[in-house]
Amino acid sequence: MKPFDYTAPASLDEATRAGARSATRFIAGGTTLVDLMKLEVETPEHLIDLNPLGDRDPSLGTVSDLPNGGLRIGALARMSDVAWTAPVKERYPVLSQALLLAASGQIRNMASIGGNLMQRPRCLYFRDVTANCNRRTPGTGCSAVGGLNRTHAVLGASDQCVATHPSDLAVALVALDAVLLTRDGAGERRIPLGQFFRRPGTTPDQEHDLRPGELITEVVVPRLDWAANSTYVKVRDRQSYEFALCSAAVALDVRDGAVADARVAVGGVGTVPWRLPGVEAALRGAPVSPAAFEDAAAVATEGATALAHNGYKLPLLRRTVVRALRELTRLEDRS
């Protein structure tokens, strides 16, 4: 780990000013950043500790109701606290489940909501400083394209980068049309989460829409009464702490045996959390039946492209969406 200096700012304004310097990183739980610093993938010269801000402004670390029926989640709130908060469990179970499936209990107790959304890719080449990686060092190439790419993306990739987005929480929030509130020296912004993450294209090192020194202060989850009927399914190599090979966040509005509306997003298969509007459209008006779910899920892989070792993700993606739909409507396979 390379040397760095450390600052604990007394206010958000002080934090954003300090964070605007080059080679600076914000730290909250540190569950991702510290690992990357040890590997020298991240080599900040300045660390800005955000935790004292939560002591001065408790709203940064808590969940609260909005007047319109939605929720606001402070960016410094810990994953475990949010997952077990009653309004989240009862009104947005997909969020609670995504958080509980995301990491071990120890990590959930430390990791912040903002930090979870900002975590870097889990690609083994990104984390190996001897390998070529355009996210880490632009212009050096992508070793994963012709290398070991079993866990990599089939949606949203480019010849510059094929790493998947690692956050389970982000998948659930994208399905719910969540919005980020951010702050920097120029003021506050509202950024729809579905527009926040950037596909790699020709600039894979530009992963998100934050400006230098800009901070996520809270996540706003809009009111969605039927989000209480939602679930998160995660398929991984092992049941204990592991990142997704494929996941699905699904919410359904079911009336009189048919789907009136749907929200579907998937993870583990895309370079960003991947909303599936085609699947949502196919579900609207469809009967709650295995056949209808299979037909809708067939749309999920439109535009997907497999690499040498991750072709299995195409049928896995369709099966994961079907599994989430069946579990949510209690049509589990009993054969």
Image (spheres, rainbow, N blue to C red):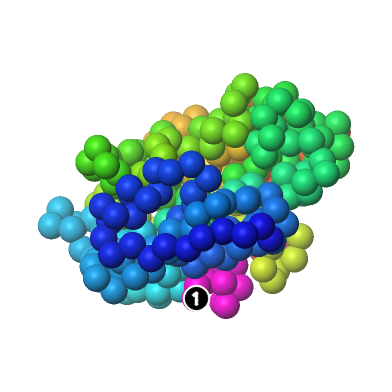
The residue pinned by badge 1 equals 109
- Expressed as whole percent of the image width and height from the top left, the position of residue 33 reads 58, 58
Q: Nearer the viewer, residue 231 or 271?
A: 271
Q: Is residue 305 left or right of residue 100?
A: right
Disc 1 packing (10 Å; few <14; some 14–19; many ≥20): some
Residue 107 is inside the magenta segment: yes
Look at the image and tell me whether residue 117 can be seen. yes
Query: What residue is rendered at 30% in x and 44% in y?
Result: 184
Q: Is residue 253 left or right of residue 72?
A: right
- Expressed as whole percent of the image width and height from the top left, the position of residue 160 reads 70, 26
Vertical comparison of 172 with 313: above or below: below
Vertical comparison of 53 with 223: above or below: below
Vertical comparison of 107 with 235: above or below: below
- Expressed as whole percent of the image width and height from the top left, the position of residue 36 reads 65, 56
- Expressed as whole percent of the image width and height from the top left, the position of residue 151 reads 75, 46
Query: What residue is rendered at 33% in x and 62% in y?
Result: 9
Residue 226 is inside the magenta segment: no
Q: What's drawn in magenta, residue-wise?
A: 100-111
Three-letter code, disc 1: Asn
Query: What residue is rendered at 34% in x and 39% in y?
Result: 192
Vertical comparison of 284 with 5: above or below: above
Image quadrant in which the N terminus is located: bottom right
- Which corner quadrant of the image does residue 10 belong to? bottom left
